[in-house]
Amino acid sequence: MMPRMFRDLIEYVRNPYPWHLAPMGYVREVTMTGKRGASEAHAWDSHLAATRAAIEACLPDPGAGRGGAAMIIGAGNLLDIPLEALSAGFEDVALVDIFHPRAGRARIRGLGNIRLVQADVTGVSRAVFDAARCRRVAALPRPAPPSLSPRRVDLIVSVNLLSQLSVIPCAYLRAHCPGIPPARLDAFARELRQSHLDWLGQSAHRVCLVSDVTRIERFTDGREIRKDIVAGVNLPAPDLAWDWHIAPLGGVYRDRDVTHRVQAHLDYRP
């Protein structure tokens, strides 16, 4: 099997990205999500279809023609994005993620009003990388979401991202700076999530928020563990909800089956 370092290098040559994303794990995470979406299609299909349907429920009437602008945050591998419907509904569609795999780039060919934007919507990844590598963690970086448009867009969609914003930054800090108290990292994670929600409300006239909110692990010995994976933020009652069978028994884990509870807010207002 090709070492991870060489896989990252090949990907970098073919599809350049800010180099710090590879050692932090962002490139591998996006790549593996695409592979798991294919290998676990039987378990993921209903979740992906439900996500696409939630986004489509927020789009203009199909008969109205193109108009305005939309922005999709957390586009990733585009498995859960209704590209053709977005292209038909808006003049300009920006697909935003910290890393866009080559497979995603290939999927938008022929859709001239859809473009890819590479951006870290937390604004902390490079600062976390620099601080952790140099052990300078006296003060963790503050969230600094970028300004991605000179004006508020008509629709912004955050797609299965809220629970993931803190995962890689916190894991990287734990690995390189084990002296950071867990409570401090928990507070940092909450701040990243809340900042994202606040930023969504400032960026668009309408916000569609889709996020997994609860992780349920069912072990072969009968135990069940539930975890709030968006702890620290208060979300209203959802318009839609469903289960995402994210890791069937024997796939990622041999001793457990994992399901995430997903919520969709079709007109989220912070």
Image: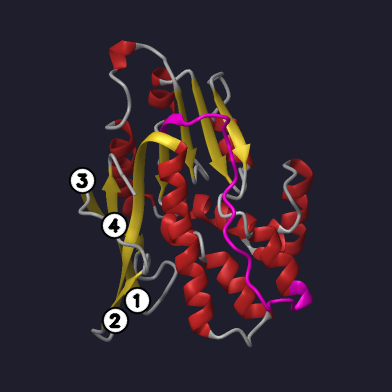
Tell which tag, 4 or 3, sits nearer the viewer: 4
Image height check: is 143 above or below 221?
above
| Circle 3: element type | loop
Q: Amino acid at mark 1?
A: Arg
Q: Marks 2 and 1: in contact by CB < 8 Å?
A: yes
Q: In the image, 62: left or right of 101?
A: left
Q: Which residue is tagged 2?
A: 220
Q: Amino acid at mark 3?
A: Asp
Question: Where does residue 83 sit, x and y in percent of width and height?
Answer: 44, 29
Q: Marks 1 and 3: in contact by CB < 8 Å?
A: no
Inter-mark Cα distance, 2 to 3:
33 Å
| Circle 4: element type | loop
Identify the mark nearer the N-term, 4 or 1: 4
Residue under the image location 31 percent in, 44 percent down = 268
Image height check: is 227 above or below 213?
below
Mark carried by residue 239: 3
Q: Amino acid at mark 2?
A: Thr
Inter-mark Cα distance, 1 to 2:
6 Å
Q: Which residue is tagged 4?
A: 235
Question: Where does residue 172 sit, x and y in percent of width and height?
Answer: 63, 72
The question of residue 94 being in magenta is answered with no
Q: Which residue is tagged 1?
A: 256
Badge 3 local density, few (<14 within 10 Å), some, or many (20+)? few
| Circle 1: element type | strand
